Each structure stands twice: as structure tokens, then as C-alpha cells.
Amino acid sequence: MLRGIKIHSYKESTRHEKIEGLPFPEKVTLYASQHIGAHSRIIVKKNEQVRRGQAVAQPQGRCSSYLHASIGGKVQDITVLPRPDGLVCEAVVIAREGDQAIQLMEPVKDITPESIRSRVSEAGIVGMGGAGFPASVKLDPPKPVQTAFLNACECEPYLTADERLLIEDAKKVVEGFRLVKKAVGAEKGIIGIEDDKKHAIGVLRQVTGSSGDIELSVLPKVYPQGYEKMLITAVTGKEVPSGGLPHDVGVSVHNVGTCLAVYEAVNEGKPLIERVLTLAGPQLIDSVNIRVSIGTGIREIIDYYQVIRTASSRILIGGPMMGFAVDDIDSAVMKTTSGILVDNAGKTVEHPCSGCGKCVDVCPMGLVPQRLNRFYDGKDYAGMKSEGLLDCMECGCCAYICPCGVPLTYKFKAGKRKL
């Protein structure tokens, strides 16, 4: 049974506005860890001149990623800095100087699964809609894949970056998806999209036409349908097993921004040096989707758009459900930064769990948050694990629906850290 919640999307202010380009920043901070797996190894030195698009770090092992200069200039520093989520890692700081033309690679002429994966690796592409799994690894699944998914649900409130990319660049996104489909060896391609994205759906119907290799699956809007396991079940009826991954049921799922980056890397030779994100929130007069250089400072973006903040304001990276609050707004945009949300930090009064069961009804993974909460309060982290904690996707549905104000999602994240 599919679970989830119906929530207001707050997307109206940005879904009809064209993507804006942010000017090149004065400097960028490029973290050596912007993906799941081993940190990238920095290969430039302080005071070295680098071109926009030049590799400044390379993978360490198979599950790692290249990192490229998103502006041309001088390497100002190589140091250790906190990312927006607080994780501390090595970083390359580049000060902008001179020509900002991109150093492109040669387009790939012989399109094969191997050449696609190789170029995706060289371009430093990681999953841009979630945890940042190195895309070249995801394009080489350990089990046969019959179906590739383009995940266009973007169910998180406020965020419309993927929706605008589909409206403005659907041809490139779909061609990138075809490259992904070829790389994973899938016979079938499905685009999963929620029914509130009417303009994007119309554009996709025109682009895919009667080709027959890609099917458009329009789904009723429910949060968190953009979670890949939930999307797979909604469309195919298959359930990814506990602790498993989509390839365990013959499926591979990819994000809109990732597919665009694959197209640009293979056909244009462009490395991943910029991305589109949504700047939004109830405190903004004008919310916007912007194309920014990776490594641009969060403060610089907020100041450029003259966002008015108060003592109670907070900055979230991502959306209001799965995003996280940023303590240091001098940290920078990463490859996985889908949105910057400015809102007021409301204070919730917590009461003891009443045992109403509403959290159980909405959990997309079929967990029992009540029991996980009891284990957490008793510091029984092994008990949390046996209750399925590691299957928790941290979507926030349980905390959102809880009438007692119990910070369930926070507790489950903390429980995972303890484990």
C-alpha cells in the first residue's frame, strides 16, 4: 500500500518564471567531498592558475568523483572547511580572475555504454537530486536492469528547479535520459511525474512523441513520491526489499538535473560546474530559480537577491521536509544543492506520544515510528536497527503529521548517527 501525505506545494511563485543566471562569484569554495564515497583527491596547488572547467581534484577509487573549477582564476587556498551540513572536509578556494570561457572536452563520438560511463566520470557528475551517488557507478549496475526511470516528481514543497529544466530544456534532458538508459542496458524508459506539473507534462509529451522507447507516467500528487523506492512501487507495483536498492528489482532511477548534465558531458564536453536551484520561502518577495556556479557562497546568493532576514530567520538547504538548517551561511553550494529556503524558525511544543498511530499510517516505508521513538528514548539503538531504522528515508512525514509535536525525524537521524 502506498503511503504519504497531501501537503501544499508552494510552487506557484517559481514554476512559471524562467531560470535566471547568477553572475560569476568573486570566489568559489569547492569541497572535495560532494558525493557518497571516497573524497576526491585535490591535484592543484595554492596560487596555481586554473581555467573554468579544469579538473582540480580526481577520484580516489571507484566510488568517488572528479571535481572541476567552476570559475577561472587563482587557487587562493587549499584548506579544511565545513560544508553546509556541518561535515568538515578539504576544499579548494578559487578567486575569480581573467577569462571565464569553459575548458571543454571533446564530444563523445562513439556512443557506447562504456564511453558514456567514462565521460560521466570525467565530467564529475553525481546524482543531483539526493545523496550524490557518483553517476558513473550508478550507470554500471551490478545486476541486470530492465527499466530506467527519469524521476521528475520533485515533490518537495517550494522546489521547482527540475520542473523549469523540463520546460526550458526538455529535449536535452530526454536525450540525456536516453544515454542513461543505454548505459544501464534498460529496454524500457519511464518518466515519472506528478499531475500538478501541467506545463512540463505538455512539453514532455511533445518531446517524447510517438518514439515508443519512453513512456510518460503521470501520477497523483502525494509527498514523498519523488523518493525512488516509492516511485518504483507507484508505477510498477514492485517493492525494493528492505536494505536493497532499485537494481534489486531490475530498475535504475535518475534525476532530471543529472540527465541534463549527462547530455552536456557526452554531447558538448561540459563538466559539471553549475546547477539550477530554487531560492524560495515565505520571507522572500520574489522566489526564483537560478543557475549558479558550484561553490558559490550561500551568503552571496542571499545578498544578491536582497533577502531580508530577521532574528528568527533560518536558512534551509533543500526543501522544508527533508532539508537541513545551515549554521554557517558562508558555506557554499554543492553539486547536490537543490534549493535554498528562507523561513522563520517556529517553536514547537513537544508532548508525550499519545499512541494515535498517525505516523504509522503515513510512513512510506511501512515502519512504526512510535516504536522507533520508544527505542530512541531508551537509548536502544540496536533496537531501532531491528525495527527497520536503516530503511527510514528521513522524509519528515511522521514528524509533520504528529499531533504531539514529537521531533521524530530528528530522532531517527540521530539514531542513525549513533549506529
Image (cartoon, helix red, strand yellow):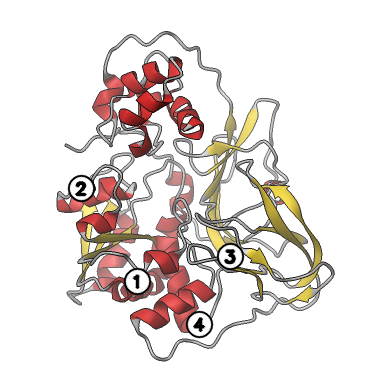
Q: Please state if 34 lies on the left or on the right of 393 as rendered.
A: right
- Residue 258 visible in the displayed image: yes
The amino acid at mark 1 is: Val
Question: Dot 1, how many residues are within 10 Å of its Cα: few (below 14), some (14-19), or many (20+)?
Answer: many
Residue count near mark 3 (Cα–Cα under 10 Å), binned few <14, some 14–19, many ≥20: many
Mark 4 and mark 2 residues within 8 Å of each other at the beta carbon: no
- Residue at the (64%, 41%) spot, across then down: 86
Q: Nearer the viewer, residue 82 or 260?
A: 82
**Around disc 2, counting alpha carbons within 10 Å, would you say few (fewer than 14), some (14 to 19), or many (20 or more)?**
some
Question: What label does residue 133 carry, if any?
Answer: none
Distance of label 3 from label 2 (alpha carbons): 32 Å
SS class, disc 1:
helix
Sequence-earlier tag: 4 or 2: 2
SS assignment at label 3: strand
In this rendering, is residue 209 above or below 192?
Answer: below
Please name which of the two marks, 1 or 4, marks the residue nearer to the observer: 1
Query: What residue is disc 3 on?
Result: 274
Of the residues tagged 4 and 2, which is closer to the observer?
A: 2
Q: Which of the numbered marks, if any, corresponds to residue 268?
A: 4
Q: Residue at x 55, y 58 (%)?
A: 38
